[in-house]
Amino acid sequence: MLVAAMRLRQLATSQSVVFYAPPEVHQSILDVCKKKSGEVVDSSDVVCWLLEQTCSGIEQLQPLYYSQGIDFCHRIQAALNNLRFLSDSDQRDAYLGAVQQNEQQTLEQLYKPKKTSNPTTAPGPFSTEIAPLMKELNFRRKGFQDAENAVLESALQEVEQEREVAFEVEAVREVQKPLRHSPLEFAGLHRDNKSFVKTGRLWAGYGGYEHTFEALRHIALG
């Protein structure tokens, strides 16, 4: 969908907007607005289709939001269960064991659909601070687990986990000072050009200019 880049403050007075869409998008607009082929599509239909696409995109991302929420609860609960994980080595190992994810996984482990869609829960009960959030997440999960976008739940969770454990290389930038070069001296205007300015005449063998195509021969384009 292409929309003219303007503020549209004078829309319908001195400005107008035209929407261009490929055939599949046009057909999608007709389907959303329940119109038949050949009927006129106006701006209200386009806005309605855009809102529907936005809501549909949010619904499809619900499993990913659920996965992020569950992972957040696990990390917070692990920190509460091991309050001295910074100073105690045993608690640190227990905390890392709860928050670290398996990095070395095969493609089958990453993307193979799971037969069951039960959420992964941390061992032991959740604290009073985390329990209400877990309850809300599980309640929201019931709203999409039987819908069409539930098919993507497993894959989205694994892709999100893979993205979280991806390594990032820190780039250190070093400021490089520009090189100083001695400027070339200007020899002055060509003598033939001076003569042309004074007399307005050109003669055979004039050397004050060069044909364009002759100059192009010396560059990559030529």
Image (cartoon, grey):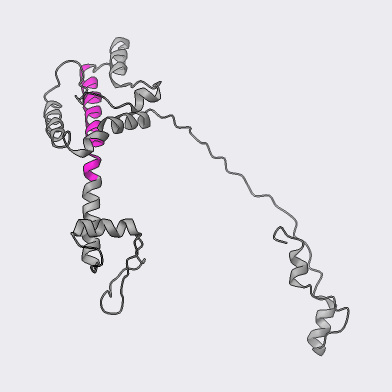
User: Hey, which residue is sitting farthest front in the picture?
Assistant: 37
Question: Quick one: 49 or 78, which is closer to the camera?
Answer: 49
Quadrant of the image for the N terminus? bottom left
State the image quarter where residue 151 is shown.
Answer: top left
Q: Where residue 84 appears, x then y in whole percent?
A: 26, 16
- The residue positioned 23% from the left and 38% from the top of the image is 149
165 versus 211 height, above or below? above
- The residue positioned 22% from the left and 55% from the top of the image is 51
Judged by its main secondary structure, the magenta piece is helix
Q: Where residue 155 appears, x then y in whole percent?
A: 30, 31
Quadrant of the image for the C terminus? bottom right
62 versus 18 height, above or below? above
Residues drawn in magenta: 58-81
- The residue positioned 21% from the left and 19% from the top of the image is 122
User: In the image, is residue 37 part of the stretch drawn in magenta?
Assistant: no
State the image quarter where residue 139 is shown.
Answer: top left
15 versus 182 height, above or below? below
User: Hey, which residue is sitting farthest bottom in the picture?
Assistant: 199
